Amino acid sequence: MDAWPSVAVPDLPGSGEVLRLYDTARHEVRATTSGPAASMYVCGITPYDATHLGHAATYLAFDLAQRVWRDAGCRVHYVQNVTDVDDPLLERAAHTGENWMSLAEREIDLFRQDMAALRVLPPDEYVGAVESVPEITDAIGRLLAAGKAYAVDDDIYFPVSAAPGFGSESNYDRDTMLTLFAERGGDPQRPGKRDPLDSLLWRGRRPGEPYWDTPLGPGRPGWHIECSIIALNRLGMGFDVQGGGSDLIFPHHEHSAAHAEALTDDPPFAHHYVHAGMIGLDGEKMSKSRGNLVLVSKLRGAGVDPMAIRLALLDGHYRADREWTGGRLPAAELRLRQWRAAAALDAAPSATALLADVRARLADDLDTGSAIAAMDRWAAGALDAPTEAGETTAPRLFADIADALLGVQLPARH
Ligand code: 5CA
Ligand code: ZN
């Protein structure tokens, strides 16, 4: 399906550093790439409600990864999915009486508008579960043929015993896995499974639910195999970064990796598993199911500058769980005004050292807090300095750094 329109990214002088990111599987910050190309798969939305600030924060983190890679001269191949058929979407549609496809279409459209407004760079391939049914059924057929899948009634399951590396992405112990599996869409109690942690690959047709007629019989795909196959078929095994929020560490990313590794016998699925922290409101994770949402579209509708939303979400480390509080937006609006004033100066002290500093901080596991603080210091200094002391090109470079590396557009003089 179509993604959203891209935005131009200014070229900066010189070249940035290799991006180092924390890898959940190995518990270390490490270089993400060794050559001139980078590949990334980020789990997309389940489109049954509007984009909230938690989604936005997660996609902003991976947007920065793309910006840092590009600045280092890397060609980026970025794939994102849309879970446009799954239980939560069907449940919401059944609840409100709306057709599930029109619900999905509307929310995907709103997501696109929110992402474009936030200047999030689009994926190169934006792929829905529905349009991927043939490739997913083909993969499940191959797992069955290899004895790496089994039927329970009309459904098909993945035996965790078929993946020798199962557990090495999350590193959770079995009790934790069982708890999270039950909380996050798994069915540990399902009679007939070989292991409670075995996951659903294919859900046979149920009355009232959408289904596809396939060589596996009528039904629809499970959730983990969707991301597994969409990523595998576009990026191949051993791509650089598998990304998403930390709520996807288990079971989703563990099972997605296990499916692909069982299918190909060619681990690893991804070299880095990268997870953004959860944005919370009033002490709880912001989530569609809890309904404690601050929506990007609502803020935009109220006239909030998307660049302030962006700055507010970036002022905090992407891996940290963090609270959305009332003070974040006014603080970001103030900062944006300062930065815009600095970018509009006729001349300012050199921003060359600032560029090196911001590059270094972002390359170090996307330390946006320090990068923003460095930008603040430069802007404050520039606004204080006598104009005649400066360079006429410095305000422009400052604006280009904000735009290219942080995605924050400051109207600047040309
Ligand atoms: N469609 C699946 C992934 S294949 C899904 O999790 N969809 S979602 O709509 O629930 O979430 C979309 C993305 O936003 C996921 O990466 C998820 O981890 C992230 N996310 C959800 N809630 C939050 C939150 N409160 N804070 C930060 N990220 C969040
Ligand atoms: Zn996913």
Image (tube, grey):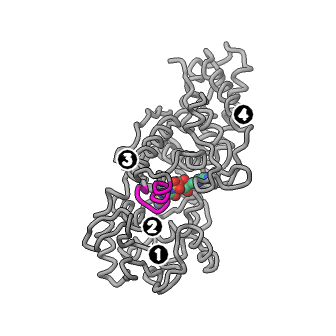
Q: Amino acid at mark 3?
A: Asp
* In this rendering, the label closer to the viewer, 1 or 4: 1
Q: Which residue is mark 1?
A: 199
- The reply to whether residue 294 is visible in this rendering is yes
Residue at the (41%, 78%) spot, across then down:
157
Q: Earlier in the sequence, mark 2 or mark 3?
A: 3
**Viewer-proximal residue, 101 or 80?**
101
| Label 4 CB-ligand 1 distance < 8 A | no
Q: Earlier in the sequence, mark 3 or mark 1?
A: 3
**Viewer-proximal residue, 362 or 323?**
323
Cα distance between the residues tagged 3 and 4: 33 Å
Q: Mark 2–mark 1 contact, CB under 8 Å?
A: yes
- The outermost residue toward the front is 97
Cα distance between the residues tagged 1 and 4: 44 Å
Q: Quadrant of residue 395?
A: top right
Q: Amino acid at mark 2?
A: His
Q: Secondary structure at mark 2?
A: helix
Cα distance between the residues tagged 2 and 3: 21 Å
Q: Earlier in the sequence, mark 4 or mark 2?
A: 2
Above-or-below relation of 245 to 237: above
Q: Earlier in the sequence, mark 3 or mark 4?
A: 3
Cα distance between the residues tagged 3 and 1: 29 Å
Q: Which residue is mark 3?
A: 124
Q: Amino acid at mark 1?
A: Ser
Q: Secondary structure at mark 4?
A: helix
Q: Which mark is residue 398?
A: none
| Label 2 CB-ligand 2 distance < 8 A | yes
Q: Give how far across and how far down residue 154 sits, in percent.
A: 36, 78
Q: Residues within 10 Å of mark 3 (few under 14, many from 20)?
A: some
Q: Residues within 10 Å of mark 2 (few under 14, many from 20)?
A: many
Q: Which residue is mark 4?
A: 331
